[in-house]
Amino acid sequence: MHLPQIKIPATYMRGGTSKGVFFNLKDLPAAAQQPGAVRDAILLRVIGSPDPYQKHTDGMGGATSSTSKTVILSPSDKVDHDVDYLFGQVAIDKPFVDWSGNCGNLTAAVGAFAIEQGMLDAERIPENGVVEVRIWQVNIGKTIIAHVPVSNYQVQETGDFELDGVTFPAAEVVIDFLDPADKDGSLFPTNNVSDTFAVPDIGRFDATFINAGIPTIFIPANQLGFTGAELQEDINNNDALLARLETIRAWGAMKMGLISSIDEAKGRQHTPKLAFVSPASTYIASSGKTISDTSVDILVRAMSMGKLHHAMMGTAAVAIGAAAAIPGTVVAQTLAKESAKSVVFGHPSGTLKVGAKTSLDDNQWQVTSVSMSRSARVLMEGQVRIPGQVLDTCID
């Protein structure tokens, strides 16, 4: 017997240059209100994974790392926080949900969703102005503050703020990532702002391993054979090149202490990120727009879930901002100056400005906060449906 479909309240939202399916924790089936196989199975089916065709035709995903995302929110019981934000990166061709990191882009939509779901007291919402939503990011155990514009007591989504990588303008949402260093380790897991590390059968590279926003490996673009101005089509259709980059990422994960064997990297696709940097130069963005070398301080490209990202992950932008502000990192060494508290970097879709506040205490670098502007918008809301067999099979 084929069971009828299950209806689950959900909201489909864009946040920054990503989009995903948002859930209020209380709306999930009871068996999925805690971590485990049932929750993962439901989210996989919602997105449409695993899909050997890599199209997500039978799900809400978009078959890219930027569009295969899920979010679960609930009111926070932590002091001075409004909402708990849990992010799940759904693999496209594997039955796997990666809970190891945050999505900085979707963070821009979390505040709006929390307000519209009634997770903030009504007296906190002004008739017109900006609401400060304090977010506890569950995956990484960090505080994020979203500054959400409000008009007539409602979240304001429309506006004239333009974000490269997003086609249409919207309202600006400023995001502050507080103390973004890894919760379980140091800002620099090797205790160095830069290292040289060897990858068997590939070569040796200068690198900065940093835990800020998301664990990230920065390598000079020229050491990878790149100019730093590459677009997706320059990399993503080359299977041999992608395999090489994934091997470098895996050995970098070992160097950071995130895995104990290379094989473990296959089950940790979301983190760490591999990014390559180069000095500012003029290039043509994926939109056809010319990005002048005078409009950026540095070029950065980043790999996400095995592919070159079409723009830049928000969490990786946090890492860029932090690394740029600390002398001696691969990112800072690539700048025309020793370091910068604020940088504009060029990515495949255009540019992004990010700023960091850092300090040196007892010869240890600390990152107080990293800030950037994003935008967000509800695309659709209602109920997402999944076959009843998904839940029935998991519970059985």
Image (cartoon, rainbow, N blue to C red):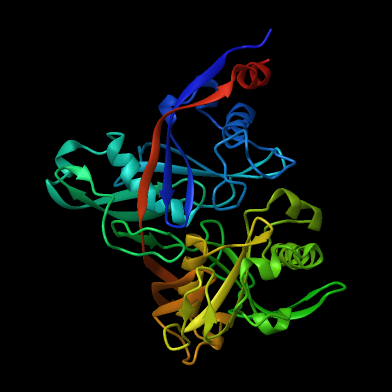
Residue 213 can be seen, yes or no: no
Between 168 and 4, which is closer to the camera in this rendering? 168
Between 223 and 209, which is closer to the camera in this rendering? 223
Q: Is residue 187 left or right of residue 253?
A: left
Q: Say which quadrant the N terminus sits in.
A: top right
Between 141 and 241, which is closer to the camera in this rendering? 241
Q: Is residue 47 left or right of residue 158?
A: right
Q: Quadrant of residue 356?
A: bottom left
Q: Quadrant of residue 92?
A: top right
Name the residue at the left extreme: 127
Residue 54 can be seen, yes or no: yes
Between 245 and 376, which is closer to the camera in this rendering? 376
In this rendering, the answer to whether 384 lies above or below 222 is above
Residue drawn at x 61%, y 26% is: 38
Q: Position of residue 156 (x, y in %)?
A: 24, 49
Q: Quadrant of residue 193?
A: bottom right
Residue drawn at x 52%, y 61% is: 313
Q: Position of residue 148 (x, y in %)?
A: 27, 52
Q: Position of residue 186 (x, y in %)?
A: 55, 66
In this rendering, the answer to whether 90 lies above or below 251 is above
Residue drawn at x 75%, y 41% is: 52
Name the residue at the front extreme: 288
In this rendering, the answer to whether 289 lies above or below 271 is below
Q: Say which quadrant the C terminus sits in.
A: top right
Name the residue at the right extreme: 201
In this rendering, the answer to whether 276 lies above or below 279 is above
Q: Position of residue 171 (x, y in %)?
A: 28, 56
